[in-house]
């Protein structure tokens, strides 16, 4: 040990070189391995269960589609969704996407124009009575279930709805029960409220008028629980049908899946009633690490991946292309939680000035809005693949849009830290020398499908600091934030949330509707609550039953005006979905407008 | 784990012999003393951990918790400058990607905002056949010595402040667990009996629980917090001290000087504090140094998994995690923090090894 | 001996119980599972109440623990919330082979590299080679495995394209994660073998063999190594322990679909049923391997039994 530092350094440096060369030697040996094992690297692209024979001949995985005999593969690698379940009624609207290719529903939405355009799918057409209390659905004829489970009829719709309503965990149980007035469709029939006219026609009389039964509750893209299952398969296999491979009516049929790893489909062996997919097989792999997904694309293991926008340049440099959805699919908005005015739940004027009723709170919230440089966030964090969000849950493709919100946005919400400081002074929070006017917590959590949220939270906290607010970042799981949401007394922080652009009704229920207060718990009967206002509650309830479009527009606009003018939220950005694709293999892709990267997979076009 | 428990066969200090020989004046004596110090680990440690930790504010040019979004992913200062490339537009892409064009030279898509069209006004839409000037890569600047991360935070400043975080967290963990372990170890060794049994069973228990799994549960329930790291590390480390200290105490107890002070009427507390503890100090210091590297690695690993120190703190493990996805283009984001961990832990381990040889050769086979 | 074994087994059972209590308490003190499981915005308080009753969440904590323990003993940790209807225990068992494969290969790599190096460095003590070995050992114990993994990934998968980046497949998929995992063990094993070899080389028995004219290579590789292997046995439990720690990190870096990745995913998704299953099964294996090593060692070397 009595050595000079240099000598010691040399002694230690050599092992570094040694270990590296060792690794290199190991790696050299293994280069043979992928070739030996018949495209070990290409294995996911053409597993033995499929056309395994063709895989062995491949010199390199990227050459896959060029093989004449090979089946064409669409291999999508995505971040794991919060859920991975085949039980449709347990899935959230994003959680069901990996199994969507095999299923269809009564209605769907247009990928081009979004949720405002409802398209027929398994329902050929439907009539709604003027008071929105009677629905008649006529179903598509000649639609075949997978694996020979027969033809689609009204029985399958009944099974679908009844099956999900028997589980208390089901997401749509409560709202469906509200308008159906029964615990199942079978009960409705028994009570005479539903009539099966023939195999392809049924008529429902609702217990309570509801305008969006076809647009929303029976729509595959928005509500997964109503993905139509086969009653014949259920009769034969019971609930085990979900284990063995459920039969749907989609253009792809189920082949195999490994929980949390991949789901694999093949094109149906018969002529599909709607579309015959260009790719013979479809594989959706989930990989939690961004780098892994990118590497899968670059090494040819996958040909379409979802990676954060900050990685795009790396992919472009390697010859990949970026596909972008025509419409924004999700938004990012920041909710200053705890604006409880109706039930006067505790808010502390010193610690939560943004929750003060009336003018004071609005001034503080305006200041918070003006502290944020949205342009920088959109350009830098989202690489320009987004547009400003002007008002949380509202969008110009949805009903009740008010152009004023966009026109006046710069003037009312624009980035102006000096003005923000003035506003805080006016509101009565001068702080000492303009510092530490008050403190707040910004809860940050990684939101599925929106990896940039963490960076946005950090930059928002920084912006608050710049105007003298002592902002503290708290890293939490989103589920914990949800816990806090449910208890009025806990929700006193600022939370970025991912907002899907969908029907006003649906989002108003989540974001602004309180519902009646439950006398037992003292809490509102609705679900997630962070804001109370009688106007919003009234509007939401009216929207459920109002069928006249002009009146609906008026109601929505009045609510939106109030939210906009009193700065109830901090809207940030609406983001267009992007996928990085291998341009040698995938030519075209239809994004769903609301489903993010999971578009209409069956319409993807292969490079010929 | 093996840091503390594996026997390290170290080279026998050759200088033992020569130490007794020299009396060539005071200067020569001191030169020898200094030469005897493990200069490499000490200097590495000073450069990578101690100096940055103490003088973080003076050294770091930027705020370690704030970034400038306009300066995202700037490469390190020495890497190449701006490169403008002139290329011909091959095709303008479909309408859903209308803000991109495809260039003829490479399979590159370029966003219109990032390029200017030769011979056309600023912001004009390029058409097929136009010449485009694109900036391929922005070079580094001296403003950010080691570049910036995806939040535009200065990596150098974060590494410097990260040193303080690493040092404070690991010292606190080692101090707390060392205190608990020493107290319990002395008590167990000195009194024996049921105290010994209980302490040693707890030690066995603590050694048989998997640390990372408990840390993950804590992170899931309480969220990532510095306290979690401390709890987990202390839960694990105290037993090492307790076991070692107990053994040493058992040996010391039987020695004459203890018996003498007992006869002289010293209280048991006094014997433990004044006679036994001073004889354990070397052992404890050596173990603590050997553990330091392990604790730094563990903390970094937990932070990497999202079960340790939360954002936006400049924890080294977190920085490596945040740069992982960017490794293809922006290697510097996770490379440098990882290097900081490597050199720090390496120097701590070398120092611990040296200390063990000097102060407590017995532990070589612990 | 019997008493010792009984005693150690009892202790191991208490340790497992302790882990189960820690895990159960931790996952129950912060909020209750219903709010996590119910979909956002749709559940009414009646639904929540019904769920609580269904899962017995309305009962006092200690009763719930007993129920939990009773079910856990039968291998039933409940159903994963994120994977509707899947048994948590089943998911853990599904993932186990992958982790074992990776850990096994890591140990093989550690032995192939670590043991010969340990022997050689001991045989050539204080030589140039010995210093290199020592340097390698220090390096192995100082390099953060997650960083090493990322650097390997960058070099061999991204830059050179020699190895697949991630996921499960043939041997080529396993090389990088197993090497990353094994590197730390190489260092540990090298030091262990070296020091225990040095002890053996010092014994009369070796000197005798040399005097007798047994060739040097035979002395070292046959006579010494066999004896030198006993000491490292005690550290086997520690190696298994650090492998466990390592797999969680390495599986995350390389997207290896093993138990570690499952655990990290369960943390992210707050999937407590799965997390409980992973932690309790994992800790039990860890405790069991400690137990086996202890008993084995006590059997080989009766002196240590009661210390």
Image (spheres, coloured by chain):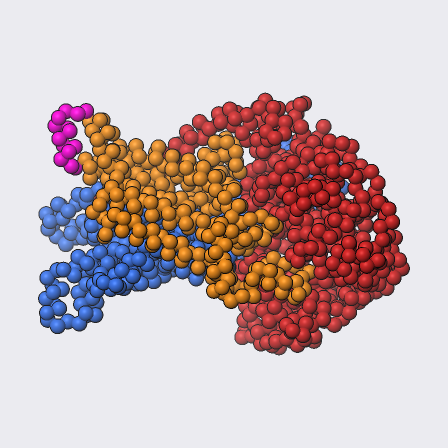
Chain colours: A red, B blue, C orange
Front position in the image: A585 or B216: B216
Q: Residue at x 87, y 61 (%)?
A: A131
Q: Residue at x 72, y 62 (%)?
A: A509
Front position in the image: C122 or A109: A109
Q: Residue at x 72, y 71 (%)?
A: A516
Q: Residue B127's x, y, as percent? A: 75, 37
Front position in the image: B254 or A371: B254
Compared with B169, A50 (above or below) is above
**Span shown in magenta:** C202-215
Q: Looking at the image, which residue sits at the far right?
A: A130
Q: Is residue B300 visible?
A: no
Q: Residue A529's x, y, as percent? A: 66, 66
Q: Quadrant of residue B13 in the image? A: top left
Residue C203 lies in the magenta stretch: yes
Q: Is residue A556 visible?
A: yes
- Answer left or right for A342 relative to B51: right
């Amino acid at each position: 040990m009595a050595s000079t530092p240099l000598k010691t350094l040399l002694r230690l440096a050599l092992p570094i070189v040694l270990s590296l060369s060792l690794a290199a030697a190991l790696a050299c040996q293994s280069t043979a391995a992928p070739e030996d094992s018949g495209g070990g690297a290409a294995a996911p692209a053409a597993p033995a269960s499929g056309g395994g024979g063709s895989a062995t001949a491949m010199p390199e995985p990227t050459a896959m589609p060029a093989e004449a005999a090979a089946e064409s593969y669409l291999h999508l690698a995505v971040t794991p969704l919060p859920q991975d379940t085949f039980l449709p009624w347990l899935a959230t609207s994003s959680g069901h996407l990996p199994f969507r290719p095999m299923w269809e529903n009564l209605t769907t939405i247009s990928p081009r124009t979004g949720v405002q355009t409802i398209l027929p799918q398994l329902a050929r057409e439907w009539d709604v009575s003027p008071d929105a209390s009677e629905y008649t659905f006529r179903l598509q004829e000649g639609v075949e279930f997978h694996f020979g489970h027969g033809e689609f009829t009204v029985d399958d719709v009944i099974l679908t709805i009844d099956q999900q309503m028997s589980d208390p965990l089901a997401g749509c149980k409560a709202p469906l029960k509200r308008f159906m007035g029964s615990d199942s469709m079978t009960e409705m029939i028994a009570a005479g409220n539903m009539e099966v006219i023939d195999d392809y026609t049924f008529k429902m009389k609702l217990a309570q008028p509801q305008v969006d039964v076809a647009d929303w509750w029976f729509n595959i893209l928005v509500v997964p629980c109503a993905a139509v299952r086969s009653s014949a398969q259920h009769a034969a296999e019971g609930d085990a049908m979900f284990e063995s491979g459920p039969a749907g009516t989609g253009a792809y049929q189920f082949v195999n899946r490994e929980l949390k790893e991949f789901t694999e489909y093949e094109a149906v062996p018969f002529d599909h009633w709607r579309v015959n997919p260009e790719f013979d097989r479809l594989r959706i792999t989930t990989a939690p690490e961004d780098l892994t997904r990118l590497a899968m694309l670059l090494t040819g293991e996958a040909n379409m991946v979802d990676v954060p926008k900050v990685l795009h340049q790396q992919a472009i440099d390697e010859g990949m292309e970026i596909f972008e959805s025509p419409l924004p699919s999700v938004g990012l908005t920041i909710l200053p939680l705890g604006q409880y005015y109706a039930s006067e739940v505790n808010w502390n004027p010193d610690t939560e000035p943004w929750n003060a009723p009336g003018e004071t709170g609005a001034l503080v919230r305006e200041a918070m809005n003006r502290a944020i440089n949205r342009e920088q966030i959109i350009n830098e964090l989202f690489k320009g693949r987004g547009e400003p969000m002007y008002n949380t849950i509202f969008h110009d493709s949805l009903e009740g849009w008010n152009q004023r919100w966009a026109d006046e946005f710069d003037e009312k919400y624009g980035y102006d830290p000096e003005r923000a400081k003035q506003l805080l002074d006016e509101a009565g929070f001068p702080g000492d020398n303009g510092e530490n006017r008050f403190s707040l917590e910004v809860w940050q959590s990684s939101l599925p499908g929106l990896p940039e949220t963490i960076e946005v939270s950090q930059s928002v906290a920084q912006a608050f600091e710049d105007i003298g607010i002592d902002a503290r970042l708290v890293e939490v799981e989103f589920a914990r934030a949800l816990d806090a949401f449910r208890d009025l007394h806990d929700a006193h922080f600022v939370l970025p949330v991912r907002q899907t652009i969908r029907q006003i009704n649906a989002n108003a229920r989540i974001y602004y509707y309180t519902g009646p207060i439950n006398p037992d718990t003292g809490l509102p009967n609705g679900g997630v609550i962070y804001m109370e206002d009688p106007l919003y509650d009234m509007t939401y309830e009216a929207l459920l039953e109002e069928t006249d479009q002009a009146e609906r527009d008026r109601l929505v606009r009045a609510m939106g005006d109030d939210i906009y003018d009193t700065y109830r939220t901090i809207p940030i950005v609406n983001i267009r979905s992007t996928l990085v694709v291998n341009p040698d293999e995938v030519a075209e892709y239809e994004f769903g407008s609301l489903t993010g990267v999971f578009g209409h997979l069956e319409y993807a076009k292969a490079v010929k | 784990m093996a840091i503390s428990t594996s026997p390290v066969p170290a080279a026998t200090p050759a200088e033992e012999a020569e130490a007794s020989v020299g009396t060539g004046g005071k200067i020569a004596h001191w030169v020898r003393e200094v030469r005897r110090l493990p200069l490499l680990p000490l200097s590495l440690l000073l450069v990578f951990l101690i100096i940055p930790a103490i003088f973080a504010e003076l050294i770091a040019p930027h705020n370690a918790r704030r970034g400038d979004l306009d300066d995202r992913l700037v490469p390190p200062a020495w890497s190449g400058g701006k490169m403008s490339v002139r290329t011909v537009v091959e095709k303008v892409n479909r309408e859903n990607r209308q803000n991109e064009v495809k260039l003829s030279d490479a399979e590159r898509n370029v966003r219109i905002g990032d390029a200017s069209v030769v011979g056309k006004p600023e912001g004009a839409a390029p058409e097929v056949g136009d010449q485009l000037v694109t900036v391929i890569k922005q070079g580094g600047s001296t403003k950010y010595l080691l570049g910036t991360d995806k939040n535009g935070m200065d990596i150098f400043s974060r590494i410097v402040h990260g040193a303080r975080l690493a040092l404070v967290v690991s010292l606190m963990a080692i101090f707390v667990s060392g205190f608990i372990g020493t107290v319990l170890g002395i008590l167990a060794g000195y009194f024996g009996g049921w105290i010994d049994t209980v302490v040693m069973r707890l030690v066995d228990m603590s050694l048989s629980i998997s640390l990372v799994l408990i840390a993950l549960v804590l992170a899931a329930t309480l969220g990532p917090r510095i306290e979690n790291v401390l709890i987990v590390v202390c839960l694990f480390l105290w037993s090492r001290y307790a076991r070692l200290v107990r053994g040493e105490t058992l040996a010391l107890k039987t020695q004459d000087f203890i018996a003498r002070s007992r006869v002289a009427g010293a209280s048991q507390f006094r014997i433990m504090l004044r006679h036994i503890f001073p004889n354990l100090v070397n052992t404890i210091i050596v173990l603590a140094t050997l553990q330091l590297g392990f604790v730094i690695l563990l903390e970094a690993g937990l932070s990497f998994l999202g079960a340790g120190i939360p954002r936006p703190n400049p924890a080294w493990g977190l920085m490596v995690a945040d740069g992982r996805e960017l490794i293809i283009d922006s290697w510097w984001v996770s490379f440098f923090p990882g290097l900081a961990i490597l050199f720090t832990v390496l120097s701590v381990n070398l120092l611990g090894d040296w200390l063990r040889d000097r102060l407590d050769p017995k532990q070589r086979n612990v | 001996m019997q008493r010792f074994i009984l005693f150690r087994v009892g202790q191991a059972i208490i340790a497992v119980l302790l882990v189960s209590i820690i895990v159960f308490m931790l996952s129950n003190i912060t909020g209750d599972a219903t709010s996590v499981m119910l979909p956002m915005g749709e559940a009414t308080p009646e639904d929540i109440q019904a769920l609580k009753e269904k899962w017995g969440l309305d009962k006092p904590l200690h009763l719930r623990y007993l129920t939990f323990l009773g079910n856990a003993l039968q291998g039933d940790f409940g159903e994963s919330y994120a994977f509707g209807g899947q048994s948590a225990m089943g998911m853990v068992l599904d993932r186990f082979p992958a982790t074992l494969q990776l850990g096994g290969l890591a140990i093989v790599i550690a032995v192939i590299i670590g043991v010969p190096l340990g022997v050689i460095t001991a045989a050539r003590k204080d030589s140039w080679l010995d210093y290199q070995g020592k340097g390698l050992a220090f390096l192995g114990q100082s390099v953060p495995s997650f960083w090493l993994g990322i650097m390997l990934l960058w070099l061999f998968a991204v830059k050179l394209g020699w190895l697949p980046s991630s996921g499960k497949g043939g041997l080529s998929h396993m090389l990088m994660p197993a090497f990353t995992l094994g590197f730390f063990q190489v260092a540990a094993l090298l030091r262990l073998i070296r020091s225990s070899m040095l002890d053996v080389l010092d014994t009369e028995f070796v000197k005798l063999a040399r005097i007798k004219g047994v060739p040097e290579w035979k002395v070292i590789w046959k006579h010494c190594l066999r004896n030198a292997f006993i000491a490292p046995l005690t550290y086997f439990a520690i190696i298994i322990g650090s492998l466990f720690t390592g797999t969680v990190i390495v599986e995350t870096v390389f997207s290896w679909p093993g138990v570690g990745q499952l655990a990290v995913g369960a943390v992210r998704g707050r999937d407590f049923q799965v997390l409980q299953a992973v932690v309790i099964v994992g800790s039990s294996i860890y405790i069991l391997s400690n137990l086996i090593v202890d008993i084995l060692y006590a059997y080989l070397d009766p002196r240590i039994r009661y210390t």
